[in-house]
Amino acid sequence: MSQNVLLTGGTGLVGADVLRRLLAGYPDAVVTALVRGGDGPTARARLRRAVELLEGARMSEAAWERVRVLPGDMTEEHCGLNAAQRAHVCAETTHIVHAASDVRFDLPLAEARRVNVGGTRRLLEIARESVAAGGLQRFTYVSTAYVCGSRDGVIYEDDDVPPDFSNSYEQSKYESEQLVRAAMSAMPASILRPSIIVGDAQSGRTNAFKALYAPLRLLVRNLVRFLPCEESTPLDVVPVDYVSRAICHLLFDDGASIGRTLHLTAGGAASSTVGEIVRCAVGAGEHRGSARVEFVSPREFNFAEVTSAGERALIAALAQFAPYLAINRDFDDTQARRLLAGSGISLRPFSSYLTTILRFAVENAWGRRFALAA
């Protein structure tokens, strides 16, 4: 039986990797990708480029024949689809993966809500119409483990206590989760929460150099002399291949993940400490043996005492990511591991493949070569 998957966020890191795995590993899957901006050919070209940057090669035309690209916009009514397109999507869709979001930390809250919460609300409208048409088997919402905000300690998968948020991204994703959770009584929905996502653990490949890549780049270039965090703080990082493989597996499971919120995280067993990550990045840098980073307790760090303009600029650049380096927490992933048991989908500590991630980033000038080749 054909599986008709509606996918958002296909030009992003997670969405593109989900798409390439659907095409490679699920021969009965037909994908409708809702892509923001441009006409049909432009949107299709953007999608292909995003996927092939991860694939490392051009995918076959036979694979792309199973992809229908619809230009749309999650911030517009009906996601920017006309009546005929919307009717067709709702009638044919059996599975939905909503991976699109604006991941910037510094957006005004109103803008983050407009994109992330508003987009989720519109996808749920399509999902409800698909349920009414009798075909929807799964709605998968890709959230983030950091809806926990500034909470520390053990964070459980079924935790749903409104925290203090570190930024508008976290808050908008938490509010989006509330919409999905409220809809669970009317549709077969799941919420999946990845932590910090980097490139493929085997190849290092990524199509985006965001989030953790900013501090890693500064460390590799030996521009950081001190960090306001504890060296022993664990940092939960997962490679995109783990996240996308888990999403695809759970999308077509026997229904065990319906109604659940699951952490796609490293957890205590596969997390690496900030110290381990910093030492590996500095060791791969320009000055290797001579470079050293000092760790300063966040409670004792005084930004006003930083006198160098260059270092003040670097600390400011790291400021958005600072909460993720400074809070000691363990994302429990017991339920996710149980549902993935026997699938062959597993994790290694970030420190074991960080060199691969850094090598790809350096060889591709932290994404600049992608832009030049476009």
Image: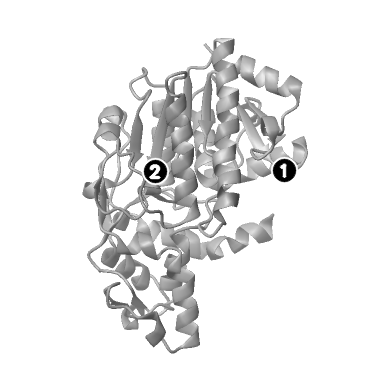
Q: Residue at x 41, y 28 (%)?
A: 190
Residue 339 appears in view: yes
Could you tell me which secondary element the residue under label 1 belongs to?
loop
Question: Mark 1 belongs to which amino acid?
Answer: Gly
Q: Nearer the viewer, residue 290 or 272?
A: 272
Toward the bottom, the furthest residue is: 307
Could you tell me which secondary element the residue under label 2 belongs to?
strand
| Rendered image: mark on residue 194 | 2
Q: Nearer the viewer, residue 179 or 31?
A: 179
Colour treatment of the image: one colour
Residue 166 pos. (x, y %): 41, 57
Q: Residue at x 36, y 17 (%)?
A: 254
Write down the quadrant of residue 181 in the picture. Answer: top left
Q: Is residue 279 shown above or below 345?
A: below
Q: Is residue 337 shown above or below 138?
A: below
Residue 172 pos. (x, y %): 49, 46
| Rendered image: mark on residue 37 | 1
Tag 2 or tag 1, which sits nearer the N-term?
A: 1
Q: Residue at x 30, y 53 (%)?
A: 151
